[in-house]
Amino acid sequence: MAFSSWFSRFRSSSKNMYRILQSSSIHNCRSQNTYLAEVLALEGRRPLRSWSSSLLPLAIAVSAGSLTLDFQRNPSMCDIAAGADDYRGGTVGGKSSTELVVKGTHKDVPQELIEELKAICGENLTLDYDERYFHGKPQNSFHKAVNIPDVVVFPRSEEEVSKIVISCNNHKVPIVPYGGATSIEGHTLSPNGGVCIDMTLMKTVKSLHIEDMDVVVEPGIGWMELNEYLEPYGLFFPLDPGPGATIGGMCATRCSGSLAVRYGTMRDNVINLKVILANGEIVKTGSRARKSAAGYDLTRLMIGSEGTLGVITEVTLRLQKIPQYSVVAMCNFPTIKDAADVAIATMLSGIQVSRVELLDDVMVKAINLANGKNLPEVPTLLFEFIGTEAYAREQTSIVQKIVSEHNGSDFDFAEEPEAKKELWKIRKEALWACFAMKPNFEAMITDVCVPLSHLAELISKSKEELQASSLVCTVIAHAGDGNFHTLILFDPNKEEERQEAERLNQLMVQTALSMEGTCTGEHGVGTGKMKYLEKELGMENLRTMKRIKAVLDPNNIMNPGKLIPPHVCF
């Protein structure tokens, strides 16, 4: 009580101190978070400098404790430099943001740094504009940035990555790690220019432990390449995001895929990591034991950090035995709610399905057009059952009965390898099928996920809005774990269509959040989902994230402007 009373008086008396400091040279000192503060600065506006760090000696002298001075007028430690109006929520990634282009401030990379990078990487470095532009624009995302990388490097070893990071940190130049370029939320944008670290040359399988069912790999290897390598050993890595995704990027975004309902997400399938921190230190996050209670769980901290805390250079993955037998089934429904209800009923039955995928009528139409098929254009469910032959067939029979009780029809299943492969090919190529409907359009893709009991309600409400819209919208869902995507196609040259896509996107996210769901089940935050995080996680959560970031990356060189909303301050 005494301390609280004292601190209240201290805050009151500090107003005069603030006025003095505001006009002093201290206020204009460059803080360690200048890059952080400039990420979303509007052109022609002078950044508001942070000065709270200057009060630290005073705070220590006055109190034995550590004080946080949170002056109302000072947006201290914010990713914002455009003034108070923008601080209140008008910038890209901030609350209620509808901006398309991620803004930033560009500073020329020092020639000294270029020479250092050449000494480290040799010929594995490029300043070519086309190559830099390619790396600065995500391949399957409508997100854009005002700048592109100044230089792209292609390290071949962990040691090279460490040296690159040390040089960039010394010069306070931003770093953006780059993998398979399949992310869709602007993770690999370079709004401030800087150095893009392309990890695709680091794709070695370093060691395989068959009896332990784990493998140690470099981050640039793709999950499909890895499974080709593992197949002769009767093993596979069970996560299956989009084709082309690399293991490093999958860790960074905490991805999953259609098999997550059986095997979990990336956080459940990574045993440990090696990560290069902003100061160049190489940290191994754990041992190779299947479980451990030793220390903080740094592995889970790094998984999903989207390159904002470090660069992943090695991953130890948990593997699974290739199933002895599998059956793939498909069935149709009159409404999307009926299909969602069957997915829920199947999970409640206790059957351990390995996949439950839902396609709406528009998605099936897109698949027919793209692949010359003649599937019934109605809501459709795809299942996969695995185990022994008898067990897989028993599961198929039980689900067939559940389907018949929920207005399902045309229940068909495949057991031959080629027939099963063809069915899952339909699902995996769904995104490309959508683009085939509107070749010159872009897609805004939602990624909401809700508790399973709310899935049918959420999909039904969303479908009503989508059908009422003038835009072409398709629905595809990992229905077994409550995660569904809407692909909203819009003409990028028509602002009214982009705004309509944004409206639909926000509507579904807000509805999911009202059901205790999330704005992103597997795609990650990047720049596209930052504006929803305060409502989903709360400001206390975001401030904690910000503090972790500030400690591990004090110069804010690690993928700045991503993941943590710009209006978060402490």
Image (tube, rainbow, N blue to C red):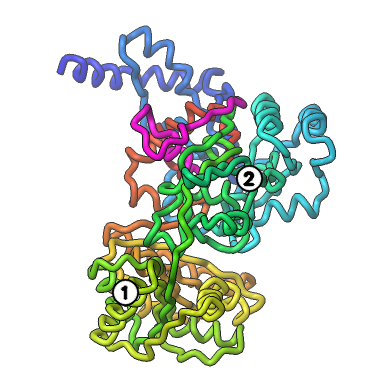
- In this rendering, does residue 563 appear at all? no
**In the figure, 334 relative to 518: above or below?**
below
Q: Is 46 displayed left or right of 303 in the figure? A: right
| Percent x, y of residue 396 | 34, 78
- Kindly identify which residue carries mark 1: 395
Disc marking residue 325: none
Task: Name which residue lies at 56% across and 59% down.
Answer: 184
- Kindly identify which residue carries mark 2: 205
Q: Is 127 displayed left or right of 317 in the figure? A: right
Q: Nearer the viewer, residue 558 or 231?
A: 231
Helix, strand or loop at label 1? It is helix
**In the figure, 252 relative to 264: above or below?**
above
Mark 1 crowdedness (10 Å alpha carbons): few <14, some 14-19, many ≥20 = some
Helix, strand or loop at label 2? It is strand
Task: Name which residue lies at 25% across and 73% down.
Answer: 345
Q: Nearer the viewer, residue 415 or 536?
A: 415
Q: Is residue 354 magenta?
A: no
Find the distance from the CA under tag 2 to the CA under tag 1.
Answer: 36 Å
Task: Name which residue lies at 41% across and 64% down.
Answer: 506
Task: Name which residue lies at 57% across and 54% down.
Answer: 186
Q: Nearer the viewer, residue 200 or 540?
A: 200
| Percent x, y of residue 372 | 61, 89
Give the residue type that dot 1 points to.
Gln
Q: Which residues are magenta?
A: 279-306
Q: Quadrant of residue 382?
A: bottom left
Q: Quadrant of residue 242?
A: bottom right
